[in-house]
Amino acid sequence: MTELGAFVTQDTTRWLLAGVAALIVLIVTLLSFRKKPQVSAAATVEAMKESSAILVLYASQTGQAESLARRTAASLNAGGQAAIVLSLKEATPDLLQHAAQALCVVSTAGEGDAPDEAMRFEHTLMKKRVELGQLSFAILALGDRTHGHFCAFGHRLDAWLMECGARQMRGCVEVDDLDPKALAKWDGFLSSLGAGQAAEEEIVFDDWRLAAREVLNPDSKAQKLVRVDLQPVEGQAQRRVVWQAGDLVEIITPKGHRRDYSIASLPGEGHVRLLVRQKADGDGSKLLTETLQPGEILKLRLKVHANFHLPEGSGPVLLIGAGSGLAGLRAHLLTAMTAGRPCWMIYGERNPVTDGGACDELIAWQDKGQLARLDLAFSSVTDGQGRYVQDALVGRTKELKEWLADGGSVLVCGGLDMGRAVDAALRRHLGNDWAEDAIAAGRYRRDLY
Ligand SMILES: Cc1cc2nc3c(=O)[nH]c(=O)nc-3n(C[C@H](O)[C@H](O)[C@H](O)COP(=O)(O)OP(=O)(O)OC[C@H]3O[C@@H](n4cnc5c(N)ncnc54)[C@H](O)[C@@H]3O)c2cc1C
Ligand SMILES: Cc1cc2nc3c(=O)[nH]c(=O)nc-3n(C[C@H](O)[C@H](O)[C@H](O)COP(=O)(O)O)c2cc1C
């Protein structure tokens, strides 16, 4: 560490100053390793003033950008450079104006959108010009070309920082689907800043066995929706078999791609349950729904998905999803019902006769009085009465407001198109301000794909 290099002196004052500097480096280093930053922006500004720490900002939907931001900070630390890691949701103009260097690791979500945690930053701060003439910055932008709007949020952030007078240390590094070559470019840039070799976070895929499988819509004209129950192979890695509602599994497909699936069960049920929609020629979905045979093994790891954990408190919960989106909601429903939180579920499928299999459990919970409200929306019915989940909200503004008034939360899971339609409906009924505030406060959470 350069600050610690100044240690070699007999001068007591310099020893003291070096001691203070070391303490600051230690504090900011510890801050950078904390899993959930809870430090206030004001405290961070104070720490920035006292040290030469590099600010590492992230905006992440499913956790990859956050994890790369932490890895970035760890590499800087390994080279003796202090770094502070913060979500963009905690970044204020004051903070940015006190930083000399900022490295931003941001993904793009939705259709070219900022991740939810950065939505307020983009819709408020990025609408203004903040004087940032003192700041040098670089951006690592995560994206996926198959989604279009490639790395759009990273580019908007890049353009805004330059408009504010900040200086680009290097051009935006675009990363397509975590391409290792692009990530190596970022590592090269970090080396030029004096970063060292941080210990790599060990990513372990364990062996899991297919315990049971059931097609929930065998007579449907739609693609198969399949319940897949998996159990860890005994004698290995039991240490990691813990998760909570909202978390994901990641699998490696036969073609070597990594695919995420929402965990539909709770650990007490004795298996990881997935609800998988088979895609025609789908690499990962075909493996889970067809190729893998009961008793056979696949590589899998559990992934914390903090942005989709159940909002804290005892308030009511409104859960909205369609099709395989039930996977991301079922464990939340179980957790919230057990905690005695009032639950309202709006679930959509195609046809009640051929695609209603996943609804039976929901209906049973409603019959037992555990699920306070259940609305089922079937889109493909012969009488012309087809409706989608967002249609279940029509004419119910008052009911919605009452449900969400007292610490209520909304969780939405499923396809991106459904998510957008539900978002538009919620904004129509409750207003844009409600949506922006609820997203910023973590009371409106989404797991879309
Ligand atoms: C956070 C998260 C949670 C998820 N949870 C679930 C869940 O609970 N249940 C679930 O079913 N899914 C879930 N998914 C989606 C899942 O991860 C996979 O994306 C999905 O199963 C399709 O992957 P695949 O490998 O089967 O298909 P792929 O091989 O990726 O192909 C998908 C389809 O696109 C076509 N295709 C592939 N590449 C191209 C191309 N370049 N151009 C044009 N067409 C192409 C294929 O022919 C196929 O029809 C989730 C995704 C995320 C990000
Ligand atoms: C629902 C969804 C929408 C996405 N939309 C885009 C997009 O519009 N543009 C883009 O470049 N990448 C898009 N991506 C790809 C992500 O940016 C990429 O997977 C990234 O690595 C995710 O990082 P995160 O986990 O930090 O959010 C999307 C991914 C998902 C699951």
Image (spheres, rainbow, N blue to C red):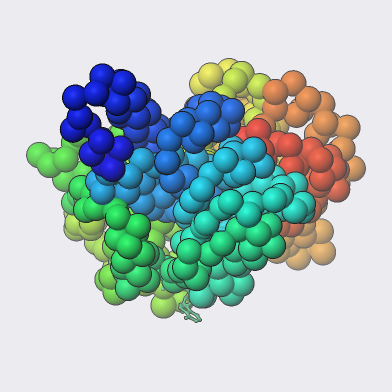
Q: Can residue 283 be seen in this view?
A: yes
Instruction: Give the answer, above or below, for where 348 lies relative to 160.
Output: above
Q: In which quarter of the image is residue 408?
A: top right
Q: In this view, does 380 lie to the left or right of 252?
A: right
Residue displayed at 39% across by 33% down: 28
Measuring from the top left, give residue 166's x and y in whole percent.
60, 58
Kindly give the residue lying farthest to the bottom in the view shown.
281
Residue displayed at 19% across by 24% down: 10
Q: Quadrant of residue 226?
A: bottom left
Q: Nearer the viewer, residue 385 or 326?
A: 326
Q: Is residue 94 left or right of residue 333?
A: right
Kindly give the residue lying farthest to the left in the view shown.
235
Residue displayed at 24% across by 53% down: 196
Instruction: Give the answer, above or below, for where 339 lies relative to 348.
Output: above
Image quadrant containing the N terminus: top left
Q: Nearer the viewer, residue 66 or 234?
A: 66
Q: Is residue 89 visible?
A: no
The number of numbered discs placed on residues in the rendered structure image is 0
Q: Nearer the viewer, residue 201 or 402?
A: 201
Q: In this view, does 161 lie to the left or right of 389?
A: left
Instruction: Give the answer, above or below, for where 333 lies relative to 151.
Output: above
Residue displayed at 47% across by 45% down: 55
Measuring from the top left, give residue 332's x and y in whole percent.
52, 34
Measuring from the top left, give residue 380's x and y in whole percent.
70, 63
Measuring from the top left, give residue 187's x and y in whole percent.
32, 62
Q: Quadrant of residue 289?
A: bottom left
Image quadrant containing the C terminus: bottom right
